[in-house]
Structures are given as structure tokens and as C-alpha cells.
Amino acid sequence: MIDSVHVLSVGCDSLSGVTFLTGVIAMSDGFDQFVLRATARKYGPYPYQREIALGGLPVLCTVPTGAGKTAAAVLPWLWRLMENGPTRAVTPHRLVYVLPMRTLVEQTVGEIRTWLANLGLADKVQLHVLMGGVDRDDDAWQVRPADPAIFAGTQDMVLSRALMRGYAEPRTRWPVSFGLLHAGTQWVLDETQLLGPALGTSAQLQGLRDALGSVTKTATMWMSATLDAGDLRTPDHRLPEVDGEAARTVALGAADFDGPLGTRLNALRRFERLRLPDEAKAYGEALAKVLVERHRPGTQTIAFLNTVERATAVFAALERTSPQAELLLVHSRFRPGERARLAARLKEPVPQTGRVVVATQALEAGVDVSSQVLFTETARWSSVVQRAGRLNRAGEWPDGAELLWSPPPKAAAAPYEPQDLDAAERMLTELEGRSLTTLELQAVQVAQSSPVHAMLRRRDLLQLFDTQPDLSGADVDVGPWVRDADESTVMVAWRSMPSGRPAEDDPFAGRAELCPVPVGDIRKLLKTGRRLWAYERVSGGWRSASQGDVVPGTVLLLNAADGGYSATTGWAPARKAPVEPVGGADVDADALRKDRSSYGCPDWISLEQHLADVEREVGDVLGEYESRLAGFPEPLLDAAKAGGRFHDLGKAHPAFQAMLLSGVADGKKAPPSEGVWAKSAQAAPSGDTSQPAEPAKPAASPKPRPVHVRHELVSALMLLHPGCDLLKDESEADLVTYLAAAHHGKVRVSIRSLPDENGRVLGVAEGDRTLALDMPGVAVLPELQLSLGPLRIGADLDGSDGAGCESWTQRVLRLRDRPDLGPFRLAFLEALVRVADWRASRAYEQEQA
């Protein structure tokens, strides 16, 4: 309890031992009552959980499976933030819970939701699942960034966002997720033995936050019974334990072995080998037969297979036997709706006839299910131990339960290394006929291969700050830092396509539609001639996908009529029966040539009003952080307000105004007066809201079609113009200009023309003129003639090359690399301006309602 004493002593008014001890007891009793309320008085905290609550979340939590690690992470953090006054200010206001398997996410979120409801905190603490697709759930947490919140998600979905490449997330949202998830966050990584490259990435990210600076306190806790602290030593992250001191670690103490936890830890498992055929088809049929024979009515039997294909085959063999028991197939390749229904069925009481669950690694760790008979194929020893945690989990069978095992069919080691299977087989053979407790099993030492994973470096993180694709249209693949290559997935949605292709206005995929599918499966599917569709980032809409589009995290569409999915068995590429589509997104993904957020307001909103409203909203967001931003440089916060004040200046470009007014001539709702407008009362046009530039034509020819300009680029060029003195007294002029340019996530570090622009850059031409503006509180901003000089690559810092200014990319990189900013703080400020813009826009709709 040394760490607890240190923390508590800070808040004591008296140094007397009596006063101090009374404070400790009072805090301990407060946490005990908190847990009893959270669990509806079903159980109180284990001693090690109480230690975490009193001393704060440690760096390492090394407790075995089945010992309540989820509660040990969430409830102490929640208590310290929401109910224990002395620790509130030093507790990060967000908790991000990272898990290796999708199945774990549903269970974890379900538990947390129940705790919040029981505590009366459901309306005070947001709870979100970080998943792919677009959804109003993303808006809910991003527009209230200062609110207490809990996030749960798999390592690929969470860490890709932490690397500004959010899987299945619209590109324009990447910087917002990055900026907010690295500010005021307590990270928790569970089941670290299954994280692969994500373990080193999480350590590097914590080290880089410490080195480069974050806005408010961030910390990380890693949880596993078998984690070696040396695994967390990376180029930018050091644990004191590695360097000669003791990092704070919480493990089980003697008091934890009393009561229910001791019963769990002493539960017995008997080991028995099955002799199954080597041939794959015969293997599945034989295993199904054994499972039916060994299954006991009224109990649950679980069978772990190493691959989805083999699990599906065994499940099909079980169905052919027509057993009386309920059958479930659990793996990672389901859409969220089916996955949630599976999770709910697993929590239901076992029927009288019993239940047989066929599963992959998706059920291996963290899921609170138990069985009296469990089968596992040989796997890495750590996986065997985790799977054994689903057998006699709570000590329900005092005389022990049966752990059956067998090597997989011949030449079928994947996804594990053959030497790891051999080592596990030798150990399981030694254990034949023996009964071991949880702790005895976890104490068994078996050598395992140590795969070499890609290591995220500082230069990699800095490179990822630029979200512009390279010249070939490809993005940096963060997959090697997130998950092992053979586990990488794309996200597939099924849509009705009567014409054989997506409709022109089909929105981006919603999260309810998305099914994770192995990258290799999709590449094979494309080779067979099956058509898939990828989202077009420039004009929006869907185009035919190619092999180059098949990278981890990509969202692709399939024609529902072509099959490929079953609600019972999940992803099934050979299945020809039509797929039942689920509801699509209600939030449209933006594209370079779309400005849908500028349409659909109840009334026309003038540019002057909108700029003032967004500046005010930035101040409101900052105010909601209360004292958490104390110590953050005031000039940087003032720059965010100024970024809001000037973010939409570029809407004074005549082409943008023409676009907003383009429907008025058709008899649609006209603006009440002349002026420069920020928001139109007309609905957004269907399809693309822009039109590409066309080459110049002879005077006698018809005028070229209107050009869609990225108004935020115009905002930046206006602020950089020598005739604009809006920032003459601003100490952070470059920062204000960047925040204005970045407020849609489309104009950030590097800026390039689109292929068909013919000399323009994102619709802006050299010499374009802007309209004069009457800025609130300042003099009239005159008409300006724009120069593309700042966008030139290689412009001199002093302007001696004739451009008259420093290049845009140089300016942004200098901001990113400033010691008092860095990528995390800069992205946070960027997110604040964007959040304020969203909030102001929504307020117009709410006022009208």
C-alpha cells in the first residue's frame, strides 16, 4: 500500500498517523460501497482492485484470467474521477479500453453499461465502441470532448485512430480522433499476450506522448498475467523497472485468495488427448462426434479451433448430427448485429439440453463464459492457457472439468508457428491425466517463438500527421504496427444494387453494415472477377475496386445479390444465397468535392454570423475543460479562438457563393437579402456538390462549368495575403491560418492539384478575387486577389525566390515540430475548431426546431 499512502498524503490536512489512517479507511470504504452499487450488491471489490482505486491505475496489472481485470480497470478509474474529490483533478477524464478480439468488446461494453446504470452515471459518463463506418455515435463523443467518457474497441480499430489512419473511418475524421484520443486519456490494454505488434506500438505512443507533449495528462496500464516488463521497452518508452527502479505493478496478494476469487483460482482442469484423424474432412466429422458424446445436458461445452474455416466445418458437422443441444458458432467475421446477438445468447442461461459453442480465438480471452467440457487444438501455449480459462471458470465443478485436446489436422499449423504447436503438444502430453488449478497452469513455462514486429518510430508518427495520399493515391499502411499481417482485415458491407452497381448517392458505409474480412480473401475474390466497390475520396460515391484498394481498414461494398454472408456462419465467400442488407449510414462521408455541411440549414446563415458563432463555440468548448487545461499556453488557446473566427473566410470566393445560390433560380428558397453566405437553406444537391475545372475555351464557346473550390484553402490564402491585416497583432498567425485551413480535414500539410484541374489547386486559380467582407468588430476586409505562391514546393523561408512567402508545407511542419506544440497538441487544437464548427451548425437546426 506504499503507493496508496503517497497519493493520500497529498490531500491530508494533518500529518498525524491517526488522521492519515482515517483518510485511508474512509476512502477504502467509499470505494467498497461504490463497487457494491455498481454490481447491484452482488459483490464488492477484491483486495487488489481496492489497491488500484486507492493508489491509481498502475503501469502493470499482472493478475490471471478470471480475476476481474475489467472491473479492476474501469471501476477504480470511474470512482477516482466521479466520486473521490481528492483524485478527480489528477485522473484523466477519458478511459480507452483496448482489447484483441471483437467478441470481448461487446461483453466489456455490456458490463460497463450495467455499472453506469446502477451507479446513476449513464447520463454523466459517455460510453462508446470505437468501430468502423460512420455513425452518430462518433458525433456524440467528438462534439463533447471535455465530458467524461469510456471507449472500448479492438486493437486495430483503436490504434489505427491513434495513428491518424482510423480503420473504416472517413479520412476527414482521422485528425479529430487522433487529436482527442491523445488528450486526457487513460489507456488500458488488456490481454497483452495477444496484441502482437500493438503491444510495442502502445508503448511507443505513450513514450512519444511523454516526449513530444500532450494537452492534458495521459497514461497507460497494461494487463496480463504473463507480461514481461521488458516487452514494453521501446526506443521512446522506458519503464523504471527496466532501468533499475520498480515501476508500480499491482498483482494478487494473500488476501485475494480468500473468498470467491480463491475459489476461481483453485478450480481444477483435467487434461486428456483425443486421437483424431489427420485428414481435414475426417477430422471435423470425428471431432463433432466426440463433442456430442462428451457433452452433458444442462452444461456448456466449448470447442476451440485455430481457424475460422475449420470452426465453420466442425459447426456444419455438428448441425448434421442434429444434437438436442443449442449450437453456436463464434468467430470475428460477423456484422455487429449478428455479433451482438451471439454475445447475448452466450450470456443467457444454458438450456436444459445444454449448449455447444464452436469458437476461434474470438472467445479465447476475457469473455466471461464457462464450460464443463472444453476442447482445444494445440496452439501457442499462452493461447492454450487462455482457452483453459473458459473451463470451470468460477469453480462450479469442485471435482474438476475436462480439457480435451488434439493437434490440428496434418500440415495445418496456421496461424501459429509449427515449433510453438510442437512445444505446446509436448507439455500437454506431460500433463495427460493430471488436474491443475488456474495458478498452477499459468505457472507452467513453455518456450514460445518471439516474432519480430515492425516498430513505430518517431519519424513514422510525424509522417502520419499528413493525411494526404501519395502521388499514386496510396496511404501509409499502419497495419504492421497494429496487428499481425495474417490477421489484417478489410471491412465489407452488402448493399442492394438493382443496376449492378451502387447508386450515385449511396452514402458511406455505416458501422452496422460492416463485416471484417481477411485481406487475402478479398484479393482472391477480386481475382475471380467478383466486383467490389471502393469509396471515391475526391468526388464521393463508389467506384469499382482494384487490388490496390485492398489494404487493412478499407471499406468495400459487395452486391447483396452475389451472396458471401450468412447470419449463422458469418463471412462465407462461397455462399451464393443473397445477403439481407442492414440499414446504411445516416451520416454521409465527405469528399474533396463535396460541401454538404454548407446546405440544409433552416434559414440562410450569413458568413459574419457563422464566424462569430464558431469563435464563441471554441470558447465554450475550452470552458468545458475547466481546470484541465491549466498551464496550457494561453496564446495557443487564443489561436484556436481566432481559427474559429476566420475559418470560413474562403466562402467569400465568388465560385463558392455561386454554388450556394445555384438552386435559387429553380424557385427554391432564396436568401432574404444580398450578402455573403456561409450556410444555404436549400438541400444539398444529389450526388457531387462540385464540378471539375475545365480547360479554357474560345470566347465564342459556352462558359465552362462552375468550379468547386475548397473554401478552407481560400481562407488560408486570404489570411496569408499581404493585403489582409486580420492577423497583424496575432502572435500565432501561422497557427491560426493552419487551424482555419484544416477545419474540414481536407487541407492540412501537403496540398496538390487534382488530376483534372488544369492549373488550379483544389478549384483555386492564380489571380482569383474574393468578395469584400464586413468583419465583425474590425474594418471591412477588401477584395483580395489570391496568389498560389504559398503552395509552391520549395519556396524560400525568406521569400527570396520571388514567391514572397514561405511555402505552406514548411509552415505546417514547423508548427508540428515546435517543442510547445508537437503533433498531439496541434491536432487537439485542430479538433477544437472543427468541433466548434459542428456545434455551431447544429445549433442553427436546434434553434429552428
Image (cartoon, rainbow, N blue to C red):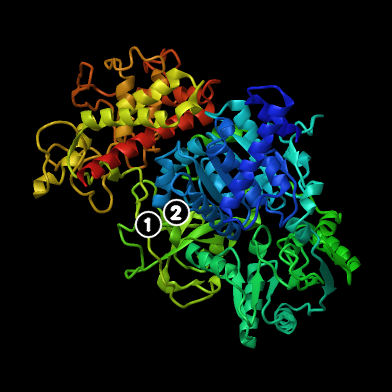
- The local secondary structure at tag 2 comes to loop
Q: Is residue 729 left or right of residue 90?
A: left
Residue 677 to residue 477: above or below: above
- Residue ID at (89%, 69%): 434
On the picture, is 19 further left or further right than 450?
left
Q: Position of residue 542 (x, y in %)?
A: 37, 56
Q: Can residue 200 be seen at all in this image of the molecule?
A: no
Residue type at mark 1? Ala
Measure how far apart labels 2 and 1 are at the Cα level: 8 Å
187 to 70, vertically: above or below: above
Residue carrying label 2: 133
Q: Are marks 2 and 1 in contact (CB under 8 Å)?
A: yes
Q: Is residue 183 above or below residue 794?
A: below
Residue 638 placement, left or right of 271:
left
Packing grade of label 2 (10 A; few <14, some 14-19, many >=20) is many
Q: Nearer the viewer, residue 114 or 211?
A: 114
Residue at the spot x=45%, y=36% of the render?
A: 146
Q: Nearer the viewer, residue 692 or 744?
A: 744
Q: Which secondary structure, mark 1?
A: loop
Question: Furthest residue to the front?
Answer: 18
Q: Where residue 479 sits: x, y (%)? A: 59, 48
Nearest to the observer: residue 110 or residue 180: 110
Where is residue 115 shown, x and y percent of the image?
54, 52
Residue at mark 1 = 585
259 sits to left or right of 612 = right
Say if 282 sits above or below 406 in the image. below
